[in-house]
Image (spheres, rainbow, N blue to C red):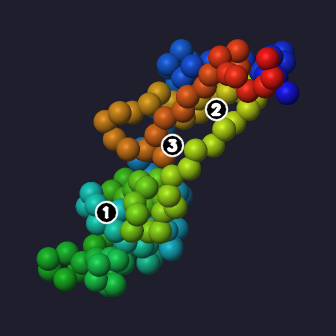
């Protein structure tokens, strides 16, 4: 089937209007016991206790299997803004699946909404998804000519 049906045109990602940047910092309500997180930059752990109303989270280190402690031996209470969800960071240590490419077919309006949701590509840091590209159907050879 040819792709020249009405409303099947896509825009190139760079031509989309600038969208809002996705929120990077977490809120206390975004976290729960059992979430795989990164703390202190690249240290991997799992939230072992959550006190969301106080914005305090205890993290069990994947390296030691114990709750993270300060130099004085006290349990370290992290704020939500100090943690990153490991699934969003794309770390392999948490059994992240290998990358995949997906083809979405839809109307120009649908594709534009998807691209606005993810925002402009950030080339300074790796994200999931890293980049979206949309092509007008007239540029494809997807059917008999």
101 left or right of 105 in image: left
Which residue extends farthest front? 145
- Circle 2 packing at 10 Å, graded few (<14), some (14-19), many (20+), is few
- Mark pair 1, 2: CA separation: 30 Å
What's the distance in space between the residues labelled 2 and 3, CA to CA?
A: 12 Å
Give the mark nearer the N terminus: 1 vs 3: 1
> Who's the residue at 40% across and 60% down the image?
91
Note whether 58 is above or below 100 in the view shown: below
Q: Specify the quadrant that holds the C terminus.
A: top right
Q: Which mark is residue 129?
A: 3
As measured in the structure, the alpha-carbon distance from the residue carrying label 1 to the one carrying label 3 is 22 Å
Give the vertical position of 19 relative to 31 (above or below): above
Q: Residue at x 49, y 35 (%)?
A: 131
Do the residues under discs 1 and 3 have CB atoms within 8 angstroms?
A: no
Circle 3 packing at 10 Å, graded few (<14), some (14-19), many (20+), is few
Residue of label 1: 39
């Amino acid at each position: 089937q040819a792709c020249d049906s009405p409303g099947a045109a896509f825009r190139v990602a760079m031509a989309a209007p600038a969208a809002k940047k996705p929120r990077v910092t977490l809120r206390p309500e975004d976290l729960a016991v059992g979430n795989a997180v990164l703390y202190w930059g690249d240290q991997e752990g799992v939230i072992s206790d959550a006190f969301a109303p106080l914005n305090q989270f205890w993290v069990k280190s994947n390296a030691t299997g114990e709750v993270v402690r300060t130099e004085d031996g006290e349990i370290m209470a992290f704020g939500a803004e100090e943690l990153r969800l490991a699934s969003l960071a794309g770390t392999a240590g948490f059994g992240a699946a290998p990358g995949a490419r997906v083809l979405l077919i839809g109307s120009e309006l649908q594709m534009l909404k998807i691209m606005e949701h993810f925002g402009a590509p950030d080339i300074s840091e790796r994200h999931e998804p890293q980049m979206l590209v949309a092509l007008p159907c007239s540029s494809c050879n997807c059917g008999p000519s």
